[in-house]
Image: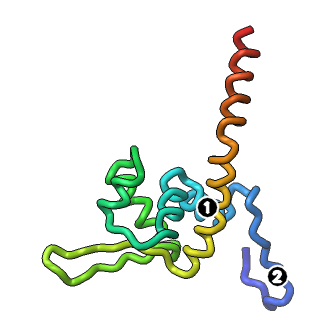
Amino acid sequence: MPWPKSTKAVRVPKANLHSANCPTRLILDDVMSRWGSLVLVLLLERSYRFSELAYLIGGVSEKMLSQTLRRLEVDGFVRREVHATKPPKVEYSLTPLGCELGKHVQSLLSFVHKNASRVLKNRDNAKEREAG
């Protein structure tokens, strides 16, 4: 497509979460992943070292936690701070943008926790209908 003579004549499309090639989907992948959401909510409390996060988030492998923290750091939600000690001490905390996001994610996780029994009951009912 040739470059337009005037940028005033060109409309920049707005982000559309429903579009397959929308860049906001990549951000959603990082934020709404199982591990990403748990990291964000934990870091709302305080900063943590890697080993503390790995311990507190049951079931996450070191590889997945490392990848999750790296993606959240690249997105600007998590700050990685290396302290000059022997051995080096690395702490993770939320940036102001991460704090803002973390509060929204915490609301979602609170809703899920509060309504887990209802959802599980619906799942059981669906299984009974399928079996019967």
Residue that carries the numbered disc 2 in the rendered image: 10
1 vs 2, front mark: 1
Depth order, front residue of 26/1? 26
Q: Is residue 123 above or below residue 51?
A: above
Tell me the colour scheme of the image. Answer: rainbow
Q: Earlier in the sequence, mark 1 or mark 2?
A: 2
SS category of the residue bearing label 2: loop
Depth order, front residue of 126/115? 115
SS category of the residue bearing label 1: helix
**Residue 106: mark:** 1
Q: Would residue 10 be found to the left or right of residue 110 on screen?
A: right
Q: Position of residue 71 (x, y in %)?
A: 46, 65
Residue drawn 57% across the image and 75% down it = 99
Quarter-of-image position of residue 11: bottom right
Q: Would residue 126 be found to the left or right of residue 51 on screen?
A: right
Disc 2 residue type (three-letter): Val
Residue drawn 76% across the image and 56% down it = 18
Q: Is residue 123 above or below residue 90?
A: above
Q: Give the total number of marks visible in the rendering.
A: 2
Badge 2 density bin: few <14, some 14–19, many ≥20, Cα 10 Å: few
Q: Position of residue 28 (x, y in %)?
A: 62, 60
**Residue 67: mark:** none
Disc 1 residue type (three-letter): Gln
